[in-house]
Amino acid sequence: MHDKLMVPAMMLAMVAAMPALAKDRVGYQAISTGSLGDAERTLTAEREIFPQRPELMLNLAAVYSRTGRQAQARALYGDVLQRQPVAMDLADGSVVSSHVLAHKGLARLGATMASR
């Protein structure tokens, strides 16, 4: 099974799968409770070990976006798009490519920037 993935709120889809008692290594629980600092620390530490994992990049991009760091979020979405696409199992049972999620994140950043 895949780890949980928090994507920007507009998408409202989270990757499901980690057992409830498993350590939150992808920042899912922290993001979902609004503990963005905790999520960022977890994601940054995990990326030092697993720098290629798209769920870590996508979740960290979501944290950056929600904390006003659009340039850093955009860079991480771009990093996801530079790698091979990975299938992500979402909470609603659908499977979506990491590239689709990155494109949606970038589109949301564009909409956020346009509304300012």
Image (cartoon, helix red, strand yellow):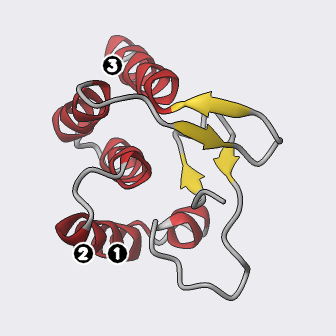
Q: Nearer the viewer, residue 101 or 96?
A: 96
Q: Is tag 3's residue or tag 2's residue first in the polypeptide sequence?
A: 2
Q: Tag 1's secondary structure? A: helix
Residue at which label 1 appears:
42
Secondary structure beneath dot 3 equals loop
Amino acid type indicated by mark 3:
Arg
114 or 90: nearer the eye? 90
| Circle 1/circle 2 CB separation < 8 Å | yes
Residue at position x 46%, y 67% in the image: 27
| Nearest the eye: 69 or 47 | 47
Residue drawn at (50%, 29%) of the image = 101
How far across and down, in percent of the image, does residue 93 sit?
82, 41
Dot 1 and dot 3 residues touching (CB under 8 Å): no
SS for dot 2? helix
What residue would you read off at disc 2? 45
Q: Quadrant for the C terminus, please.
A: top left
- Report the disc number at residue 116: 3
Label 3 and label 2: CA atoms lie apart by 32 Å
Residue 6 placement (x, y as % from top left): 55, 51
